[in-house]
Amino acid sequence: MEVFRFLLTVIPALALLLLLARSWLEPDRTTPSLWLCLAVLLLSGFLLASIVRTIPGGPFISIHGDILPVMASIVTLVSVVSGIRTVSIVRRGTLFFFGIASIAIFVIVVIDITTFWRDRYARGALFGW
């Protein structure tokens, strides 16, 4: 069962890293791809939902459930902000929605970590998969 749960988190994490690398290495990064932004946000949301925090035992900060979604949301937000000026009105609205969604993922991760951190009985490792 642990192998299945590990694979269930490793495959989307690797897919997310691959999408982020692909978006960063694109030769024409003036306009962000809508499908790429959508895939990054969906994978971030899935990884965010797959995190399990146990009391006691931690971890307080999960690599696949906290760090990767925050990193992906920051990259998505930067690409949205940099490309929002050069596109049409409909595409601006979609990119604005993606920007709000990436900010929401960042806020959810921060709230999740701080509420777990402030629990009286929370002990354990600081970082974990």
Image (spheres, rainbow, N blue to C red):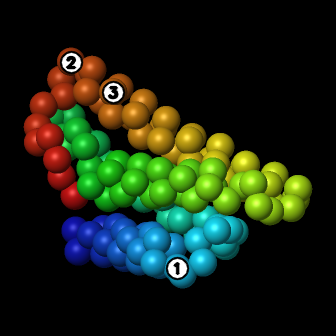
Residue 8 appearing in the image: no
- Indicate which disc, 2 or 3, sits on the residue closer to the N terminus: 3
In the orientation shown, which residue stands out farthest toward the right?
A: 89
66 w.r.t. 57: above or below:
below
Residue holding disc 3: 114
Secondary element at tag 1: loop
Q: Tell me the amino acid under the disc marked 2.
A: Arg
Mark 2–mark 3 distance (CA, rounded to whole Å): 12 Å
Residue 27 appearing in the image: yes
Q: Tell me the amino acid under the disc marked 3.
A: Thr
Query: Looking at the image, which is closer to me, 49 or 31?
Result: 31
Secondary element at tag 2: loop
Residue holding disc 2: 120
Rendering coords of residue 91 (x, y %) = 81, 61
Query: Looking at the image, which is closer to me, 119 or 72?
Result: 72
Tell me which residue sits at (61%, 65%) in the image.
37
Tell me which residue sits at (27%, 55%) in the image.
63
Q: Nearer the viewer, mark 1 or mark 3?
A: 1
Tell me which residue sits at (18%, 52%) in the image.
128
